[in-house]
Amino acid sequence: MRGLKNEAKVEEWLQHCRTNDIFVASAQETWQLGTAQYENSEWLLLSHGSKTKLSNRGSLGLMFALSPAARKAWKDAGSEVTDYGLRIMAIRLKLMDDKGKHITIKLVNAYAPTSASTEEDIDGFYDQLNLASQTSESEILIPVSYTHLRAHETGRNLVCRLLREK
């Protein structure tokens, strides 16, 4: 979702989430500045971006939108947001599986640099992504990202954006 800089765009995105029974949604390239938590209706929005504007149109920025049920799961897991530079953020959700056992899911929202970026920037991103992907034995890692894979590796984009509420 490009450019979630105004309330109308955020509301349009959340309406899509509500209509489709989305549990957690992630967005990249939101163009939001700073790190913040704010409510929009019953949803909780967790955003992370640059402290200052990096271009005229906007750039970077990540966001999780938590449904009321996901918000509870996030609170049950400790209400933490961890950032790994400007392009990666992670949260944990504590849920119950179908056997009544508590499980913790770590969601990693990442927005990779394009292949036009320097090798140093690209390698730095993947180093940070490796750190963000580390979990304890009892956690389940779910990447929710828009990742520009290096053209010489696959030439395709990987998009994993939404978890549906069951």
Image (cartoon, rainbow, N blue to C red):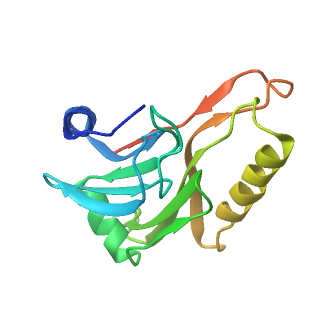
Q: Is residue 35 above or below residue 32?
A: below
Residue 166 seen from this side: no
Which of the pair 57/32 is nearer the observer? 57
Query: Which residue corresponds to the image point at 73% horizontal and 32% vertical from the top-left?
Result: 149
Which residue occupies 70% across, 22% down?
A: 156
Q: Where does residue 70 sit, x and y in percent of width and height?
A: 31, 59
Quarter placement of the N terminus: top left
Nearer to the camera, 17 or 5: 5
69 vs 76, left or right, is left
**Taking 161 as reference, is 42 left or right?**
left
- Residue 67, x across and y down, in percent: 26, 53
Q: Position of residue 87 (x, y in %)?
A: 59, 50
Residue found farthest to the top:
155
**Residue drawn at x 78%, y 57% as measured from the top left:** 127
- Pick the front one: 52 or 106: 52
Q: Residue at x 62, y 60 (%)?
A: 85
In this view, the residue in front, 61 or 100, is 61
Residue 20's image quarter?
top left
- Expressed as whole percent of the image width and height from the top left, the position of residue 166 reads 31, 46
Vertical placement of residue 57 versus 91, above or below: above
